[in-house]
Amino acid sequence: MNTIEIEKRYSTLAETECCLSCGGAINLSEPKPGEVCIDLGCGKGSDLIRLREAVGETGRVFGVDVSDGMLAKAAKNIEKFGYTNVHLLRSELEHIQIESRTADLVISNCTINHATDKHRVWSEVKRVLKKGGRFVVSDIYSSAPVPEEYANDPAAVAECWAGSITKEEYLTILEETGFSNITIVEESKPYAKGKITVSSFTVSGQKASCNCGH
Ligand SMILES: C[S@@+](CC[C@H](N)C(=O)[O-])C[C@H]1O[C@@H](n2cnc3c(N)ncnc32)[C@H](O)[C@@H]1O
């Protein structure tokens, strides 16, 4: 993946007030006291603070992002609360620097569309989840396959539209990764973004609690 364009775009956006979310993953994820939660593409860290409020002192929260600017902003925001169990990691989604079977819950908001190898990202989500763990992810999908001229343009991918895939492709990846209880919990009407039409949605699912099947 081209992290240079991501870094360029998001380190600038870290200093703005603009909202970068595309759905309500955090609102729909029901983190509980004592749980271990990971936010993939944590940005400025506002969802990390909400996760920490929910899991309390006995839980742990990890924020993963590839942008130094975003991580610096997140560190500043978290510092105001004095939390010691919120950890920031500079890591690509394709290679999450967290031990296997760590998390009860993985959330992500408007980030996975940027990843070049989405199969790999979802395998990583499954790897870091405990057996029976769940994910709640907000993202965008494209109404039609994105033309290669845009999909291969790192700047357009960093703009949060050209890396999107269709809903069918998205759900197929989740199924092929071996998640169960895959559910679309919210979904927008199509709207124009960049040079294409996309929809926002939030999808949830679970890693099997036994070694059966997958
Ligand atoms: C649209 S912003 C969303 C930030 C945050 N989740 C929110 O809702 O405000 C996408 C974030 O994902 C990060 N990101 C994009 N691609 C990434 C990748 N492949 N690995 C890790 N982080 C990535 C960016 O640096 C950015 O902070």
Image (cartoon, rainbow, N blue to C red):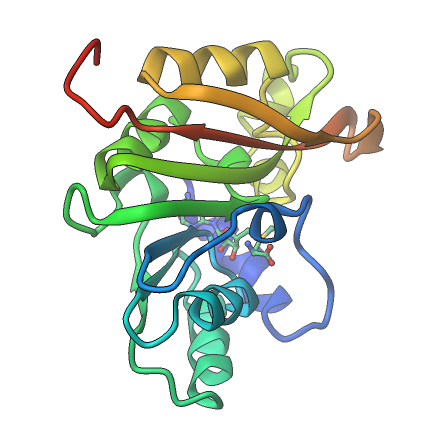
Question: Percent from the top left, x then y, of residue 73?
Answer: 50, 77
Is residue 100 shown to the viewer in this render?
yes
The residue at 42%/87% (across/down) is: 79
Q: Is residue 35 above or below residue 102?
A: below
Question: Which quarter of the rendered picture does the N terminus lie within?
Answer: top left
Question: Percent from the top left, x then y, of residue 193?
Answer: 79, 34
Most extreme residue toward the front is 33
Is residue 119 or residue 108 the one in the foreground? Answer: 108
Q: Is residue 32 above or below residue 184?
A: below
The residue at 68%/44% (across/down) is: 23
Does residue 169 appear left or right of residue 38 in this picture?
right
The residue at 36%/53% (across/down) is: 38
Does residue 27 appear left or right of residue 58 in this picture?
right
Question: Percent from the top left, x then y, of residue 153?
Answer: 57, 31
The residue at 32%/77% (across/down) is: 57
Is residue 75 or residue 30 the one in the foreground? Answer: 30
Question: Which quarter of the rendered picture does the C terminus lie within?
Answer: top left
Is residue 140 or residue 84 the one in the foreground? Answer: 84
- What is the quadrant of residue 82 in the picture? bottom left
Q: Is residue 122 above or below residue 50?
A: above
Is residue 1 shown to the viewer in this render?
no
Question: Percent from the top left, x then y, of residue 115?
Answer: 45, 35
Is residue 168 or residue 195 the one in the foreground? Answer: 168
Q: How many marks?
A: 0
Does residue 152 appear left or right of residue 15 in this picture?
left
Does residue 152 appear left or right of residue 145 in this picture?
left
